Structures are given as structure tokens and as C-alpha cells.
Amino acid sequence: MKISNETKVGILGVITVTILILGFNFLKGNKLFTHSVLLNAKYANIQGLTASNPVIINGLEVGRVSEITTDPSMKEILVKLSIFSDVNIPVNSVAVINPNPLTVTKVEIKMGDATTYLKNNDNINTVPSGEYLSGVFNKVDPVIASVKNAIDQLDSLMGAVKNVIDEKNKNNITAVISHLNDITINLQALMDKDKGPLAKTLQNTNSITQNLAQNNQKINGIIENLDKTSGELAALDLKTTLNNLNQAITQIKETLEKVNNGNGTAGKLINDPALYKNLSSTSNKINLLLDDIRVHPKRYINISVFGKKQTEMPLTTPTPDSSNAPYQKN
């Protein structure tokens, strides 16, 4: 049987149309020969999501975005998700749009824990990606939420500080910083390793330490001598010596009391006025006798050939050259 050219053209056209339809559906994310489940997700902002973008669960691609439609008011955008993997999705799962500036925008399904599962043409829960991540952070790691709150409070505090610091305070802060710079310069000069006072002090200290090290043997000898002297002092019977000294002082005190009271020979010599007068008179007479011998020596030493008689009278008063002598008249 001979097939006409018109029939051949018709068959080729049908095949071409079929391939185009299948290719269009493939580009839309629909698998050609597998069963898929359609899920409806509604968003207020799809963040650049387009048809054929992947749908992932736990990092694994399980489907694609098959269609995106909206109403004239643009208040709600309907996104149809074609799930072609054999996956059971709990009814409390959430579809979150995950934008990525480096790759394509994805729809990520966060699996719930319900025991019933979504069916074909069911609606899946959706939340904006920012709100979902914030809720996840608050649940998974409360520290992150605390840090975020702390950063917000710090930002508010910095704003308040900026308002408090006026031009006058800024000038004061500048002056303080200038003084701190001057202090730093002075400290650097003080700690200069070649000319700084601290360096010189350290050098002197090092010199003293070296001298001590060089004279260590002498110092040890001095310490040994001190130790020996201390031992000798400790060996002395200081208690007995002090007792003897105390007894001697007591005896001297008793002796002085007797002398003051006129007891004994020494007491009488010191305290008896008659003895003093007698001694004074005797001394006066002795002085007068010596003075008379000096003036009239012939009266006491008479060497005369002819035996001349002495007619001079003895002295009864001091001579002029001894007028300052302590003579007393009886």
C-alpha cells in the first residue's frame, strides 16, 4: 500500500506537535512519563520565583514549579508545585520561597510531623521566608534571637550617645585624646632603652646587683662573723652579770646613803663642820709657817760664826706677795 505525501506530512506534523507539547511540559517542570502530585501554594511575594524552578526537601530536588498565576489585584499569587517524587508530605508542612542571588530561587518544603499527608490539588501552608527563618532561629537557637535583640538595643544606644555628645563634649573628648597622646609620648621617653630614666635606673640596679654578686664572699664572711658574735653573746651568762651589776649598784647606793647620813669615817669627813674648821685652821697655820720660813729663814736655819742673836719677830699676817693666800685669823 502506497502512502501519499499528504499523509506523510500530516503524520510528521502530529509528531512535531506532540514533541513540542511534551517539550513544553518538560520545560515547565512536568515529568513526561511519571505520575506527579500538584500542590497549591499561595504567596503575597514570590521573590523572583519562576516556572520550572526546583522544589526541594532537605536539599533534595523532589519537583518543580509548574505554574504561577495571580489575580488582577496582585494581592495573592498562586504557585502550583509539581511533586514527581514518591514522597509523603505531612499536612502541616510549610512551603518557603528561598531566594538565592547566586543561583535560581527555590521552593523549600519544611516537613511537618503530622501523620496525615497532602493529596493531589491540596493547599500547602506558606509563610514569607524572613518570618519563617526568624521563627526557626527563635526555636532552634535562642542565643541568635538574643544577639539580634542586643544588636538592636546597641544600635538604639549608639543613636542616643550620638545625640548626647554635642560639639562641646566632642571638643572635650578631643582634648582628652590629645592629653593621652602627650602622656604616651612622655611614657615612651621615660622607657627609652638608651636615654630614658627608667633605662638608667635599670642599669644602676644591674650595677648594684653585679657588685653584690662580686662581693658575695665578703658578705657571707660578714654574716658568718655576725652569726659567731651572736652565738658568743648568747653563750654569755648575761643574767648573772646583770644580777651582779644590780647588787653593786645597790651597795653603792647604800654607801652613798650612809655618807649623806654621816655614818662612818667618810660620812663624818664630809658632814662634820668641826673637822672642816680644824682642817682649814691647820692648813692656814701650815701656810703661815711656810711663809714665815720663806721671809725669815735665819730664824729656823741659824748658821752664824759669831752667834748673833735673832731679833726679828715672827709673822702674824701674810706678806704682801701672798695676800691672795687663804689665810684666816684665829
Image: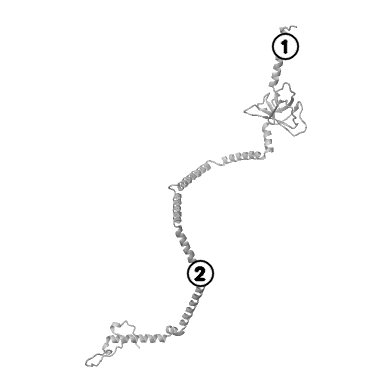
Residue 11 vertical placement versus 251 (above, below):
above
Pinpoint residue 40: horizontal percent, then vertical percent.
Answer: 73, 26
The residue type indicated by label 2 comes to: Ala
Residue identified by numbered label 2: 235
Visible residue check, residue 328? no
- Marks 1 & 2, CB-CB < 8 Å contact: no
Which is more N-terminal, label 2 or label 1? 1
**Furthest residue to the left?**
306
Give the amino acid at mark 1.
Ile
* Spot occupied by residue 246 in the image (x, y as percentages of width and height): 50, 75
Q: Residue 165, how many percent across, how many down?
A: 55, 41
- Can residue 7 be seen here? The reply is yes
Residue 56 falls left or right of residue 289: right
Task: Residue at 58%, 40% (x, y): give it.
Answer: 158
Where, quadrant-wise, is the C terminus in this rendering?
A: bottom left
Question: Toward the viewer: 158 or 12?
Answer: 12
Secondary element type, mark 1: helix
Is disc 2 placed on a helix, strand or loop?
A: helix
Q: Is residue 103 above or below residue 287?
A: above
Query: Can you identify the residue that label 1 sits on?
Result: 11
How is this picture coloured?
one colour
- The answer to which quarter of the image holds residue 282 is bottom left
